[in-house]
Amino acid sequence: MNRAEAPARFSPGSTVPAAGPQLLARLAPHLLSVMRIMVGLLFLEHGMAKVFGFPAHGHLPVFPETEWFAGRIELVGGALVALGLFTRLAAFIVSGEMAFAYFISHAPRSFFPLINGGEAAILFCFVFLYLVFAGGGPWSLDALWHRRSA
């Protein structure tokens, strides 16, 4: 079948159906929620490791170590982000924590994140910063709360 005979649903020179961009745009808010849940759970895991020692990862920080405070922020912030509850505020706080962690713990080791081990801190920081502006998406407790109050 040549291009002249191709079905109308395909745009010239493309193998993607014309409805593809609309479908992707329609699913984008739901994928935002999936990303928020996964990032929140990964962050929650960091907090659990620092607060409860599960999964076991290094030493358990004790008060007043910086990691002791970080563990509590990560535990609560990760849970709030994963649930989509107070998403923007929680994401703002944990994004700041990750920026602080990067500049205090990683940047002094080297300028390059690959060498200083700060890639995860940078990724978390900017994903959480994105969530400050994007919100929790349709599959969040925030969205449920707003639907019920409207």
Image (tube, helix red, strand yellow):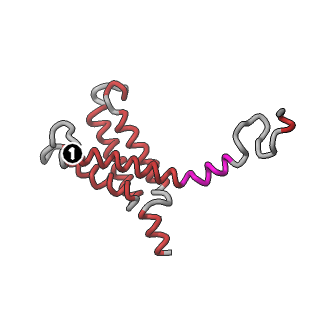
Q: Position of residue 88 (x, y in %)?
A: 41, 57
> Which residue does the image show at 33% across and 24% down from the upper left?
115
Q: Is residue 56 above or below residue 30?
A: above
Outermost residue to the right? 4
> Which residue does the image show at 45% across and 67% down from the upper left?
144
Q: Is residue 137 left or right of residue 53?
A: right
Q: Is residue 100 magenta?
A: no
Q: Position of residue 110 (x, y in %)?
A: 32, 25
Q: Which residue is mark 1?
A: 54
> Which residue does the image show at 71% across and 37% down from the upper left?
15
Q: Amino acid at mark 1?
A: Phe
Q: Is residue 113 above or below residue 148?
A: above
Q: Is residue 14 left or right of residue 98?
A: right
Q: Is residue 45 above or below residue 142?
A: above
Front one among 111 and 24: 24
First to last magenta residue range: 20-29
> Which residue does the image show at 61% across and 48% down from the upper left?
24
Outermost residue to the front? 1
Q: Is residue 83 left or right of residue 70?
A: right
Q: Position of residue 37 (x, y in %)?
A: 41, 52
Q: Position of residue 89 (x, y in %)?
A: 38, 58
Q: Is residue 22 magenta?
A: yes
Considering the numbered disc 1 on the image, is that residue within a helix, a strand or a loop? Answer: loop
Magenta stretch: helix, strand or loop mostly: helix
